[in-house]
Amino acid sequence: AQSVAQPEDQVNVAEGNPLTVKCTYSVSGNPYLFWYVQYPNRGLQFLLKYITGDNLVKGSYGFEAEFNKSQTSFHLKKPSALVSDSALYFCASFGAGKSTFGDGTTLTVKP
Amino acid sequence: GAGVSQSPRYKVTKRGQDVALRCDPISGHVSLYWYRQALGQGPEFLTYFNYEAQQDKSGLPNDRFSAERPEGSISTLTIQRTEQRDSAMYRCASSLVGGSTEAFFGQGTRLTVV
């Protein structure tokens, strides 16, 4: 069985500060890990993924994530947050067809 | 098409009626997923196709739910004898092939059972 956990329902940061949205996983075998963002009344949009290789992956809009096998984590990061980054963020694992999403973290960036 | 298209965007139906939700994936995408998303929660996996073959239907809640993709493109999720607890956002996604390629999501169908 595979599972993904996002321990924080809400993350608040000031504009210009670095942000981290946390994700931990429990997946058998090699995990395929993804981050998606959802804006109000919109579908989910792909941000970045880890399949294999370099543990630091870079994605859209300046976001990056670090795969840490020993801590089974895949935290989403951005060096300098923008107000427009405010949205709902989902971590997900895909493998052998079935996919599992976390319950989401609401990111609020205040001016 | 340019993206994943779902129809209808909104559906209100009476309890006990059958509904069919349609998903038109990105052209050439082999894999197609169906999810159900409750407010404030992440998408819940329902089922998955590669081409026309249903690879995994373990997420379908009960036998009132079924899905097909007969020609390996458009897919239909059917809910028979709808119940109020079926009310949710139903989302479809497609990917080029398998779990290592990113899935692109449609706008979803908001189903309300009254």
Image: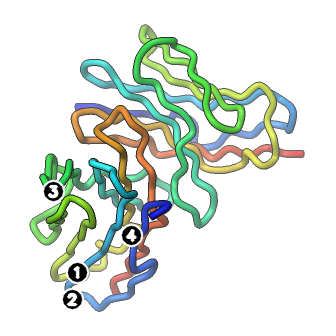
Disc 3 marks which amino acid?
Glu
Q: Which residue is mark 4?
A: B88
Q: Which mark is residue B17?
A: 2
- Extreme-top residue of the structure: A70
| 1 or 3: mark nearer the eye | 3
Disc 1 marks which amino acid?
Thr
x, y (%) of residue A90? 51, 43
Q: Along the line of sight, which residue is nearer the eye, A1 or A52?
A: A52
Disc 4 marks which amino acid?
Ala
User: Alpha-carbon distance for marks 4 and 3?
Assistant: 26 Å
**Callout 3 and callout 2 share a chain:** yes
User: Alpha-carbon distance for marks 1 and 2?
Assistant: 6 Å
Q: Which residue is mark 3?
A: B52
Q: Is residue B4 above or below residue A98?
A: below
The residue shown at (90%, 45%) is A111
Determine the image quadrant of residue B63.
bottom left
User: Alpha-carbon distance for marks 1 and 4?
Assistant: 12 Å
**Contact, mark 4 vs mark 3 (Cβ under 8 Å):** no
Q: Which circle's residue, 1 or 2, is located before the other in the chain?
A: 2
| 4 or 3: mark nearer the eye | 3
Disc 2 marks which amino acid?
Gln
Q: Which circle's residue, 4 or 3, is located before the other in the chain?
A: 3
**Contact, mark 1 vs mark 2 (Cβ under 8 Å):** yes
Q: Is residue A92 above or below residue A78?
A: below
